[in-house]
Amino acid sequence: MDANATTKAPRFIYEVECVGADGQVKWTERIENLVTTVGKTDLIDKYFKGSAYTAAWYLGLKGTGTAAVGDTLASHAGWAEVNPYTGNRPAITFGTTAAGSNTATAVSFSITVAGPTTVAGAFVASVNTGTSGLLYSAGDFAVSRSVVAGDTLNVTLTVSAS
């Protein structure tokens, strides 16, 4: 079998940029995520089995600790969600799919907590708040990063099956 013909579950690449209150880029990070077991199961149920489906997805920020394939939105013992911004998890707006991938419009988090707050990764969930939804994916930064009030985190997601 051609190794290039095999595909794992669609995964996300997170491009993260932290811009300070002065408009200068403080740091950037590019990470690939893991797809959780519940995310893979949901994908199969929705796409191949044809069960109830919604296209609503939201982006959250995670604190220190390592994401694991067995994590769920209700149970992720290795890490906690951090919310150094006002409001719920922002919605992800996808663009046009081509060549097995789709890049979403950048999601911006305006940091409002004085901080510093440690941000160590990001995740994609099916609900904008709470733990009753689906955790599709989560990714860890190479190193934890600090954000403070006045910073803006811009996160561009690309979902790819190739």
Image (cartoon, rainbow, N blue to C red):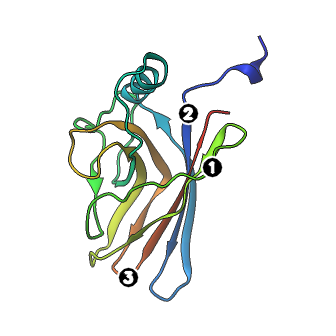
Closer to viewer: mark 3 or mark 2: 2
Instruction: Give the total of numbered labels.
Output: 3
Going from N to C along the chain, the mark reached first, 3 or 1, is 1
Number of residues whose C-alpha sits closer than 10 Å to that of mark 2, classed few (under 14), some (14–19) or many (20 or more): some
Q: Secondary structure at mark 1?
A: loop
- Residue at image mark 1: 96
Q: Amino acid at mark 2?
A: Pro
- Of the 4 image quadrants, the one containing the N terminus is top right
CB of mark 3 within 8 Å of CB of mark 2? no
Disc sitting over residue 108 in the figure:
none
Q: Crowding at label 3, few (<14), some or many (≥20) Cα neighbours within 10 Å?
A: some
Kind of residue indicated by mark 3: Gly
Residue at the spot 65% in from the left edge and 42% down from the top edge: 101
Place of residue 3 in the rendered image (x, y in percent of width and height, measured from the top left): 75, 19
Can you identify the residue that label 2 sits on? 10
Residue 55 x, y percent position in the rendering = 42, 42
Q: Earlier in the sequence, mark 3 or mark 2?
A: 2
Which badge, 2 or 1, is on the more N-terminal residue? Answer: 2
Identify the image quadrant of the C terminus: top right
Q: Which residue is pictured at 27% across the width and 48% down the height?
A: 80
Which residue in the protein does label 3 denote?
150
* Vertical order, 57 against 109 (above or below): above
Would you call the spot at circle 1 few (<14 residues within 10 Å), some (14-19), or many (20 or more)? few
Quick check: 58 above or below 19? Answer: above
Q: Give residue 37's position: percent from left, percent from top.
A: 40, 25
Amino acid at pointer 1: Thr
